[in-house]
């Protein structure tokens, strides 16, 4: 059984953004913009949002507000420090006093760092160090269109460091948006593979937060609720994307998972996923999904009871036998990934087998995440997990 005496742990939480969550909640955006007193609004989004028509819907909602608009929409992949510097060079003279982040994790993370850089200046790489963010940024309204990253509620922004190709994080409570606006209408247009990868990202956040060494009563409550939303609705959201209820509950599940990992942290799955994204451009949610069952299998000796609890509250099992419940949850997640089209085996996303030892060394060195894992992970352990995931050969630990 998982041992975690939450009654004896110090409890310190991050603030939660003001939340507006219902189909049609976009109607609140002009009210929020007017309430802020902003004169110059920067919208940060990506090419997919432009092509889907979602950006047009958002801009139209602001019609009538006396706002000067600047739109940065050239984001086409996961962000790097160089891209942030390029965007900052374009927006600093505009001097926005309100930012809207629209889309998935990439525009969210870029907008969060830009909100600080407008005040503090400097280059993006200078923020990849502890306590680098010294001041609160300009107000930020986050409008996620994918249900996955939880960036709309987290104090974290993740970027590829162009100097070494490794994903790294800027971490500060100053990065948390003031407002999160969750409108299922805006996520109805998301492609199935984006929905699948982002949804598995949210599920990974919830599971890792629930089994983190930093888990506490506050984070546990949100992690459990996140899993209760995501498990029943993810497959429907992927295979029947116009199902509004599924989209709504996935957005809520992602938001709750974001609160959970903000206050308990993520762990080995994310550490192992970073080299896949930074070095080989594997989308973050896909990387997490491909690694999740193998890390869970590795962690099972340390947290079988916690896995059993999640299997029980989602109806995956009814037995009270913790080991069998843990196995059932791992099997369920592996089958869920298969059903929603996540590639099986790292070889299917063009990861060279020869790269495994180097990736393992890099992942094991991400102590900020590995220290949260319920079972210690050495470089050799990381290499073994990668090898299982590479050939899709899940074995008992």
Image (tube, grey):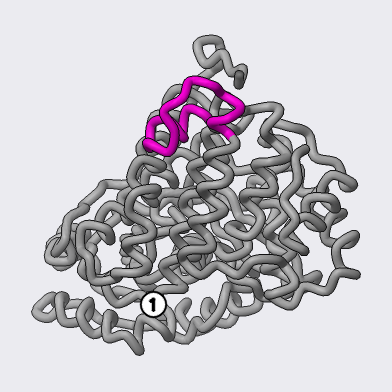
Q: Nearer the viewer, residue 1 or 171?
A: 1
Which image quadrant: the N terminus? top right
Residue 237 picture quarter: bottom left
How many callouts does the rendering have? 1
Please tell me whether mark 1 sits on a helix, a strand or a loop: loop
- Was residue 248 drawn as part of the magenta stretch in this picture? no
**Left or right: 159 in relation to 62:** right
Residue 256 lies, in percent from the top left, at 37, 43
Tell me which residue sits at (45%, 29%) in the image.
220
Q: Is residue 219 visible?
A: no
Tell me which residue sits at (84%, 50%) in the image.
384
Residue 264 lies, in percent from the top left, at 54, 34
Image vertical order of residue 77 relative to residue 245, above or below: below
The residue tagged 1 is 191
Q: Which of 334 and 206 is in front in this view?
A: 334
Q: Nearer the viewer, residue 268 or 88?
A: 268
Q: Residue furthest left?
A: 64
Q: How crowded is mark 1: few (under 14 residues within 10 Å), some or many (20 or more)?
A: some
Residue 397 picture quarter: top right
Residue 283 lies, in percent from the top left, at 59, 70
Tell me where the magenta segment starts and ends, as one range. 308-326
**Left or right: 229 in relation to 93:** left
Residue 158 lies, in percent from the top left, at 59, 60
Tell me which residue sits at (58%, 18%) in the image.
4
Image vertical order of residue 30 relative to residue 63, above or below: above
Tell me which residue sits at (53%, 37%) in the image.
209
**Left or right: 272 in relation to 232:** right
Q: Residue furthest top?
A: 8
Q: Is residue 160 visible?
A: yes
Image vertical order of residue 298 relative to residue 144, above or below: above
């Amino acid at each position: 059984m998982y041992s975690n005496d939450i009654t004896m742990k110090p409890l310190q939480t991050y603030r939660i953004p003001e939340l507006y969550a219902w189909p049609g909640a976009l109607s609140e955006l002009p009210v929020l913009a007017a309430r802020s007193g902003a004169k110059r609004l920067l919208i940060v989004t990506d090419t997919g949002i432009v092509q889907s028509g979602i950006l047009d819907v958002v801009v139209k909602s602001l019609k009538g507000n006396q706002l000067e608009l600047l739109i940065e929409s050239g984001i086409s992949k996961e962000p790097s420090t160089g891209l942030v510097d390029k965007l900052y060079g374009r927006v600093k003279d505009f001097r926005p006093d309100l930012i809207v982040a629209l889309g998935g994790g990439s525009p969210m993370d870029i907008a969060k760092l830009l909100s600080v850089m407008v005040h503090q200046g400097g280059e993006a790489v200078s923020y990849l160090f502890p306590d680098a963010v010294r001041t609160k940024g300009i107000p930020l309204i986050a409008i996620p269109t994918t249900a996955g990253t939880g960036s709309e509620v987290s104090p974290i922004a993740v970027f590829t460091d162009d100097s070494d190709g490794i994903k790294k994080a800027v971490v500060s409570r100053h990065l948390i948006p003031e407002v999160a606006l969750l409108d299922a209408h805006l996520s109805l247009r998301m492609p199935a593979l984006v929905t699948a990868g982002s949804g598995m990202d949210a599920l990974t956040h919830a599971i890792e937060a629930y089994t983190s060494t930093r888990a506490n009563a506050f984070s546990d409550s949100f992690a459990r609720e996140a899993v209760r939303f995501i498990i029943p609705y993810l497959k429907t959201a992927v295979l029947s994307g116009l199902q509004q209820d599924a989209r709504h509950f996935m957005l809520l599940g992602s938001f709750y998972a974001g609160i959970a990992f903000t206050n308990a942290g993520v762990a080995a799955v994310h550490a192992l996923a970073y080299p896949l994204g930074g070095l080989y451009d594997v989308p973050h949610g896909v990387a997490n999904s491909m690694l999740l069952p193998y890390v869970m299998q590795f962690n099972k000796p340390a947290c079988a009871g916690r896995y059993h609890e999640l299997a029980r509250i989602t109806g995956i099992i009814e037995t009270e036998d913790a080991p069998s419940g843990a196995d059932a949850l791992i099997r369920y997640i592996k089958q869920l990934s298969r059903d929603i089209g996540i590639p099986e085996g790292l070889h299917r996303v063009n990861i060279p087998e020869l790269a495994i030892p180097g990736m393992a060394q890099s992942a094991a060195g991400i102590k900020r995440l590995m220290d949260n894992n319920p079972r210690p992970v050495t470089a050799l352990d990381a290499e073994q997990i990668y090898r299982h995931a590479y050939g899709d050969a899940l074995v008992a630990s």
